[in-house]
Amino acid sequence: MPALRVLVLTDDAETAVATADAGGVDSESGSANIVALSSATRAERVLRAALPDTAAISFRVAAALIGRSALPLTGVRHVIVAMPDVPGEPKGRDALDAVMGELPKDATRTLVVAQETSDVEALVARHFFKARRTVESASAPLPAPGRVVRVLATSPGARWDTLRRILDELDPASGVVVVDDTTREAGIRTLSTLGYGPAGAVRIAHGGEVGEAAVVLFVGIPDAAALRAALVSAAVHIVVLCAPREIASLRALAGTVPVTPLLLDGPRARAESREAATRARLREILITGAFARELLTVAPLLDEFDGSEIAAAALVHASEVQRAAAPVAQAAAPSPSRSAAFERGGTRPPRRDDRDAPRGGPRGAPRGPSKPRPFRPREP
């Protein structure tokens, strides 16, 4: 009887799809080795039609399916949790806790993280008690003086168009595009479309085969050996195309080598009029990394637009919200007090004791004695 036996839990639907894409397709049956369940409604329909052996699903979608009693977990034997590099939202953590609580007790549990953080330690204490830790040993890149790694955040669906824009921008005399097994065919097809054949100036490389080139472009996060080979090469530019949530892993991998964003001239030229104070504040936010929730909001837009264009649009939206809120704030502001208006040189209605005070005397002074009136007899 078919049953769901392996469950891969991710933080978002995009990571679930990328995991399923990396799993490939079975050559004999033609079916996917890993099925991506990216939305609750579609996932419920897919699970009713046929139960896959392995599925990749986000925490929130899995929790929603459990609430509908639509995710069969009794046959699950292996659970793999892909922890995001940035801290998730509290709702996301609650969803993960709900899913982990419904899994069979005898299912093996594996947690994959880029680095150990307080969130990871808390998760291990709740659901991976007494788990065996395995740390991947990798030689750190050489801290080459003056070397810089450029990063351009993009989604998997827009990476090849972004690659084309980078090649148009840099126009390198020679270049290497480093891919893995899952992106090799797409990379060859993209370069062929741009006029680079098998022996062209820009070629496809696999793994750590960087060689000598003016530009080294990594599609996805490189491993330590490939990044080390690029840093010791004569490349003028080292560029990494990765998802926004992978930038933290890239910084950890690069070590002391600076990782800075790559700005394409088109969006940058349109943003030249931005004030220096705004740029400085954005730079502070980027350094602290305190934008995890906002990053989840704008990440889907990377399929259509460049990251700097999205940032400029966000500034426009913030200005519109501020202008719309200004009349409301002005209407709600309290009117100045009478004493304040008087201190600024304005006038105020006289008080009752002011009207009764003798003219020329100080305000509020008591009334003086009234003058006696002369006696006037009544006329007959």
Image: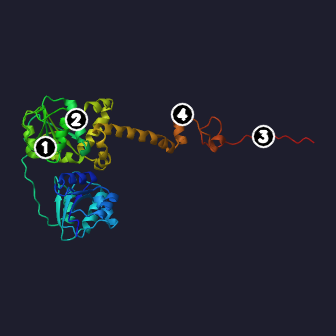
Residue 164 image label: 2
Q: Can you identify the residue that label 3 sits on? A: 373
Report the number of discs: 4
Left or right: 350 in relation to 242: right
Disc on the earlier residue, 1 or 2: 2
Q: Can you identify the residue that label 1 sits on? A: 254
For label 1, the SS is helix
Which image quarter holds the C terminus? top right
Name the front one of labels 1 and 2: 2
Figure quadrant of residue 76 = bottom left
Q: Residues within 10 Å of mark 4 (few under 14, many from 20)?
A: few
For label 3, the SS is loop
Q: CA distance from mark 3 to mark 4?
A: 40 Å
Kindly identify the amino acid type of the residue bearing the numbered disc 1: Ala
Disc on the earlier residue, 1 or 4: 1
Q: Is residue 143 visible?
A: no
Q: Position of residue 241 (x, y in %)?
A: 20, 41
Which image quarter holds the N terminus? bottom left
For label 4, the SS is loop
x 29%, y 57%: residue? 92
Q: CA distance from mark 2 to mark 3?
A: 105 Å
Q: Position of residue 188 (x, y in %)?
A: 16, 39
Disc on the earlier residue, 2 or 3: 2
Name the front one of labels 3 and 4: 4
Q: CA distance from mark 1 to mark 2?
A: 25 Å
Q: Can you identify the residue that label 4 sits on? A: 345
Q: Are marks 3 and 1 in contact (CB under 8 Å)?
A: no
Q: CA distance from mark 3 to mark 1?
A: 103 Å
Disc on the earlier residue, 2 or 4: 2
Name the front one of labels 2 and 3: 2
Disc on the earlier residue, 3 or 4: 4
Front one among 252 and 181: 181
